[in-house]
Amino acid sequence: MSSDPSNTSSSAPYARDRAVDKPGIIGARWWHASLVDQEAQIARRTAIRNILIAGGVIAGFGAMLAMCVKAGSSPSGLLGGAPDVSDARKTALEMQKEYGWSFGAVGEALVFDGYATKPFEPGALRSLATDLAPASPRLVPFFQATLFQSPDAVPPSLGKLDPSEVAGFQPLSAVMKPMFSTSMDAAYARGKSLASLFASLAEVPGQTPASAKTALIVDLAGPESVAFAAGAIAMFDPVFLFDNWPHPRGIVRAQETLAAAAYYQPLFAEAKKANRPGRSPMFVLDRRRIATYTDDATEFDNRYVAKLPPSAAAMRALDVTHILYVVPSQRDAFKELDDLNDELVVYSNGGADVKALSLDMFATDKTDAGVSTPPTAQKESDKLLGESGFVYYGGSRGSHHAFFADYPWARPARAATTRPGTNTGKSYFPSARVTPYSSGSPSGVLTSKPRPTSFGTVPVAIAVGTGVILGARYSRSGSWNRSSGGFGG
C-alpha cells in the first residue's frame, strides 16, 4: 500500500440512457418526401418556402435530440440533479477550518480508545491553547496551537456548502470528552520517574536540573505523549506540536490526543501558572502523524509533519546541547521516524549529542515494596519517584540512578548498584537517509523538507463554471456522489 495515493476520479464512463423516437421527426421526413411528388403542382417559390420550413423543423428536433442526450448523460441537464462537478485536491486542514472540522462526514461519530473518568465542562476547552502553551516566552514561537484551537472554531464558509453537507453540523466541543486509559497512566508514571532523575541533579553542589542541558523530543502515540508530558512537567516545559484537527474518518485520531489534553488540562494550567524557572524544553509529538494512508473514499488525510527548531544553533539558543528522543520501546530506539531524520541529523552535525530513550526502560521493581525515606525527609526526587508509583529506570531501585551513567550529560547525584541489562537507545545515533519525508542531505538550517505528493490533502467537488467548492468528493451526503454512482466507501 502506498502512502502517496494518486488523484483518482469516482466518475464512471457516461452511457446514453435516453433514446429519442419522436413522431414529429418521422413526420418531418415523410413531409419532405411528399414535396417531390407534388413538385409539378406547386409553384417553385412555395416549394422552396416549405423546404426551408421542413429544414427548420428537422434542425429544431435535432437540437432537441442533442439536448436530451446531454440531459441523460449530465447531472445538470434538463432532467435535473446536481451541477456538473470537477475534482481537485485541497489542503485538508484548510478545508476543515473553512467548512467545519467534520468536512465531508457531518454527523459521523468520533472514535475514542479510552474512557472518561470525571465530569467535563466543554467550556474549559476554550482555554486549552492558553493553558497548554509553554511558560517560557522563548519556547512560544515553536508551539503549535492548531489542535487546541479546534473545539470552538467557527467555519466561515459552512453555509456555502450543499445543504446536505451543512445539516447536522455541531461544533467539535459538543462531541468531545476527556479521555483516560491504562497506557496513558503508564506513560504518566514514566514521565514522573524521568523527572525524578533530573530533579536529583539539584542534590549535587553547583548543579540544577537544567545543568544537563537536555531537551526531550517525546514521540509516542498522542494520548501517551500528553500523559508523559504531564508526568514530566515538574522538570520540563512542554511545547506541543500537534498540527492537525480531529475528523470522523481521520487517519490520525487527533480527537484522542485532544481528549487526553482535556484530561490533564488542570495539571498543565497549574504548572504554567507556577512558572517554575529553569525547566528544559520538552517537544511533544503524536507518533501517528505520518501513518500510512490508503483510500480517499474511507479515510481523511489529516496527517502532518513535525515542526522542530530548524538548527543546532536554534537548540543552543534554548540552552540545549543534548537531545533525548523518547520512543515507546527499544525496537523503536534504533531509528527515528522519517520526518525527524533531517532535524536530528542537523542537530548531531551541529554538535548536539542525540540519544534515544524507550519507555520500556522504566518498570516497577516487584521485589521492592516502594519503601522510601519518610515524607518529612524526602527530597524532590524521592517525592516524584513516589508519585510515579516507584517506577525505576532499569526496573529496580539499584539501577535507577544509572541513568546519568548511560547518558553522561551531568554528574549523577546518587550511586547505582547495578546497570540495566540492555538499552539500545543509549547507542542510538541519527544517520542521514532518503525517505518520502527527509532529504538524505540536510543543511545546517532547515527551511523545508520533502513530503509525499497529495500529503495532507482531501479531494473536493468543485462546481464547473463557478469554481465554488461543493464539499468533500467522497461525502456520503453530497448530491454529486449520489448522481454519479454513490459513495465510494
Image (cartoon, helix red, strand yellow):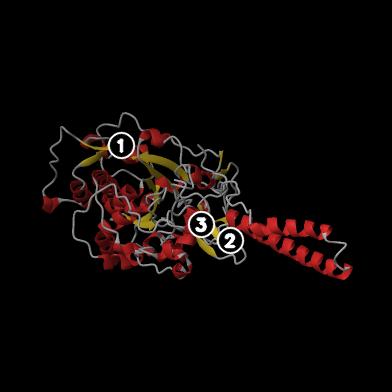
Count of numbered circles in the view: 3
Residue 77's disc number: 2
Measure how far apart labels 1 and 2 are at the Cα level.
63 Å
- The answer to whether residue 124 is left or right of residue 350 is left
Q: Which secondary structure, mark 1?
A: helix
In the rendered view, would you say 411 is above or below 145? above
In the rendered view, would you say 6 is above or below 139? above
**Cβ–Cβ under 8 Å for marks 1 and 3:** no
**Residue corresponding to mark 3:** 480
Where in the figure is residue 162, as x and y percent of width and height? 47, 64
The amino acid at mark 1 is: Asp
In the rendered view, would you say 90 is above or below 424? below
Upstream in sequence: badge 3 or badge 2: 2
- The answer to whether residue 267 is left or right of residue 1 is left
> What residue do we see at 46% from left, 44% from top?
353
- The foreground one among 452 and 64 is 64
The single residue placed furthest to the top in the displayed view is: 421
**Residue corresponding to mark 1:** 360
The amino acid at mark 3 is: Trp
- The foreground one among 187 and 2 is 2
Upstream in sequence: badge 1 or badge 2: 2
Image quarter of the C terminus: top left
